Amino acid sequence: MSTRHPRNVRRPVAGAVVLVALAGCGLRIPHSQVVAQEQLRAGAYPPGATGSDGTATGATTGTADTGTSGASGTTSSSGGSPTSGSGTTTGATGSTSTSGTGGAPKTGDTSPIVIGTTGGYSGVSNIGTVARDTLMVWARSVNQQGGINGHQVQVVAEDNASDDNRSLAAVQDLVDNKHAVAIVGLGPGTDIAPFMPYLQRKQVPVVGGFVTTGNWWNYTMAFPDGTYGPTVVHGYDATVARIAKKKNIAILYCAESPQCKDNADPAAAYAPKEGLSVKLEQAVSIAQPDFTSSCLQAKGKGVEAMLLFVDSATVKRIASSCATQGFHPIMAGLGDNTLSSNPDLQGMVTASDTFSWDDASTPALSAFQKAMSAFGPNVPLSSVAAGTWAAAEEFRAALRGATGRVTSATVLAGLWKLKNETLGGLVPGITFTKGKNATKNSCFLPVQLVNNKWRASSKRICLSL
């Protein structure tokens, strides 16, 4: 792949450091602020849409109704009833907003299809907002086109603040009280293990999302939408070795969330298989304004690449700190379009388990681009957004030809029919069989930032895990 750089951007010379970043946690946001932001009403964004500055817009279309504040928790839903208008109701579980697409109800069973999702929308790990907002965009796009088989799609999202106990409670509420037929598009920061025994008993599927652990391949009710989870983490090692062609690495991970270290340790263990040598591994805080000390340590140990398990804002600060010390790194990790124009990040490489979020070369990829532009222009485009969109499209593919009322059994029957399904090129190929765990696919897509645009490699890299 070409590594040309724009003018006025310093090119790395021999021995220059390469920083590799996987965003695994976010910045701390007070829960009260998130709830308040969720209740905003303006513009054409989905409920809870995240702006480029990380602020939730929480907008819906239609006429907003007023509600009263509930206890704790935040629930956002999009694409609710087939009738026009939108509003909010609040109660013990927090606020709920719905948005319809207008028009008179059709004859027959037109009950909305309710899907649930949960993620870290507040607290230390608020990176789940991108997955939530992308799912809202998808629902609005689908509903504008008439829904799925005449049914409008309603998304209900509950904040778990990246807490396993809250994840279980959220999923139970979504299924038992909100009547979700599936859990769809989970974002980073949410492990499925705490609630899978419950979903197994209820026979309710969890469909795709940001999967970095192997748990998605350990349950018959789990239906991942892309690459085998550990492949993504190990893909950063492979990308550094094969695309950036570096050898000596350091690994920095956020101290605020155990999930950062849970990704860092497997990356360190896999590194030697790609010919990489780990020279430094340490925890850092995402609250740090400066990372000069870490940069100097890495430089002193002859490090050529740094794996950073932090959020994108921290990636920018680390890149700036290292550049000040004479490092002009090629970044690699969980990229997004908020990083695209940063001169310190040109040449950055990443590993996607689904598709490249800047690519519009096929009908399926173009549909993603158009929907995000129309309904979520401030939602960061990234592998998280790509994975969420792919999960939602997997859910829709499972309902091809389905008639009548949609239930969890309807969704499961359709999922079990998917064999080497690529969703028009969004995913490497997924296969599900009734009574068996998902088939593993260990191929990821290398993507590189060149001239302010993310460009996919010509082919996927497959790993032997």
Image (tube, helix red, strand yellow):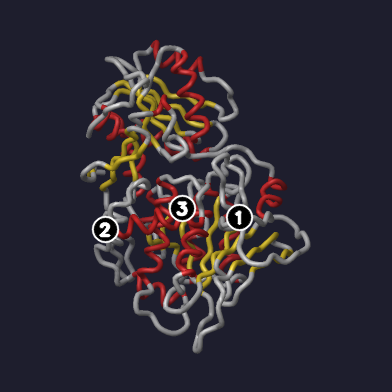
What is the C-alpha distance between the residues marked 2 and 1? Answer: 37 Å
On the image, numbered disc 2 is attached to which residue?
Answer: 429
User: Which part of the image, by quadrant, shows the N terminus?
Assistant: top left
What is the C-alpha distance between the residues marked 3 and 2? Answer: 27 Å
Q: Residue furthest bottom?
A: 108
Numbered disc in front, either 3 or 2: 3
Q: Does 64 sit above or below residue 315?
A: below
On the image, numbered disc 3 is attached to which residue?
Answer: 373
Report the amino acid beneath label 2: Gly
On the image, numbered disc 1 is attached to which residue?
Answer: 43
* Nearer-N-terminus badge (3/1): 1
Circles 3 and 1, Cβ within 8 Å, touching? The answer is no
Task: List x then y, in percent, for residue 90.
Answer: 72, 64
Q: Secondary structure at mark 1?
A: loop
* Nearer-N-terminus badge (2/1): 1
* In the displayed structure image, the side of residue 224 where residue 40 appears, left or right: right
Task: List x then y, in percent, for residue 63.
Answer: 67, 67
User: Which part of the image, by quadrant, shows the C terminus?
Assistant: top left
Q: Quadrant of residue 4?
A: top left
Look at 51% across and 82% down and name the residue there.
110
* In the displayed structure image, the side of residue 55 where residue 460 appears, left or right: left
